[in-house]
Image (tube, rainbow, N blue to C red):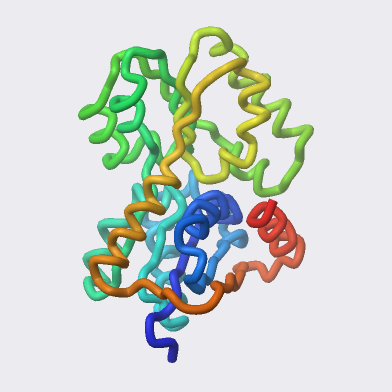
Amino acid sequence: MEKRGKIGVFDSGIGGVTVLKEIIKILPKENYIYYSDSKNNPYGEKTSNEIRKRCDEIVKYLINQNCKVIVIACNTASASSANFLRKKYPEIIFIAIEPAYKMVHDYSYEKPTLVMATKSTIESEKFNLLLKKYDNHKTYLLPCVGLAQKIEEGNETQIKKYLNENLEMYRGKIENVVLGCTHYPLIQEEIQETLGKVTFFNGAPNLANHLKNVLEQKNLLNNRGSGKVKFKDSQDSEEKRKRFFIYLYH
């Protein structure tokens, strides 16, 4: 058994790779196991109970893999399951992603803002408390039903068609875009092409810094050797594995 354990990261698919990339930038010596639940993707249209059940099963797997901390790298899973998991597994450190709406409040408050997220995230109590606390009263909420699945499938034609149909109305009206799903940074350039010049807000860098601080405080940092990344997919998809590592090291 490893003395300091692994960092477990999970998402409804491969979108959480955008979170893992930020973590590896500042914690390159850690060992990681990434769980992609592509068999049950997307989470955004599932009920909270369905999502909690899947998250619980994934967490059990990651605990058995000797994870010292578990990162919920999916906004939908975080919104519906983070509190549930923390109560059920009080001995485990959970670090949960959330839409970077507070960053708009801190750095770009006056500018009109579009929050792109799954329907489940936008309707969640967790996000609505965040919105109520930091609302700039110039915010549009866009539940991007089906977008994460199109990104997961990697169909560029369908992604561009979706963005043109759903974002064109905001072109020239928006200056900030909150990427409220970890899949969305994978198509940031395509979003920019549709909306024009905008500033993106993504919660992954802040999560990575928070994770490092927590590991330092608990004396759990791994300072030896070079880190490794293990990939596990619930569908055992070799195609997903290949795309995951292309995104990770691109």
Query: Which residue appears at 62% of the width and 26% of the height?
Result: 191
- Relative to 64, say whether 80 is above or below: above
Query: Which residue appears at 28% of the width and 29% of the height?
Result: 131
Position of residue 184 measured from the top left corner of the image (x, y, whole percent): 57, 39
Q: Is residue 60 visible?
A: no
- Relative to 117, say whether 233 is above or below: below
In this view, the residue in front, 188 or 28, is 28
Q: Residue furthest bottom?
A: 1
Location of residue 51 by image quarter = bottom left
- Relative to 86, say whether 131 is above or below: above
Location of residue 154 by image quarter = top right
- Relative to 120, say whether 157 is above or below: above
Q: Residue furthest front?
A: 224
Q: Which quarter shows the N terminus?
A: bottom left
Position of residue 123 measured from the top left corner of the image (x, y, whole percent): 36, 35
In this view, the residue in front, 166 or 20, is 20
Question: Along the horizontal axis of the image, is 106 left or right of 40?
Answer: left
Position of residue 14 measured from the top left corner of the image (x, y, whole percent): 60, 55
Question: Along the horizontal axis of the image, is 33 left or right of 56?
Answer: right
Position of residue 54 measured from the top left corner of the image (x, y, whole percent): 45, 64
- Number of labels in the image equals 0
Location of residue 222 by image quarter = bottom left
Query: Which residue appears at 31% of the width and 67% of the height?
Result: 215
Q: Is residue 113 visible?
A: yes
Question: Along the horizontal axis of the image, is 240 left or right of 92?
Answer: right
Q: Residue furthest top?
A: 172
Query: Which residue appears at 78% of the width and 33% of the height?
Result: 157
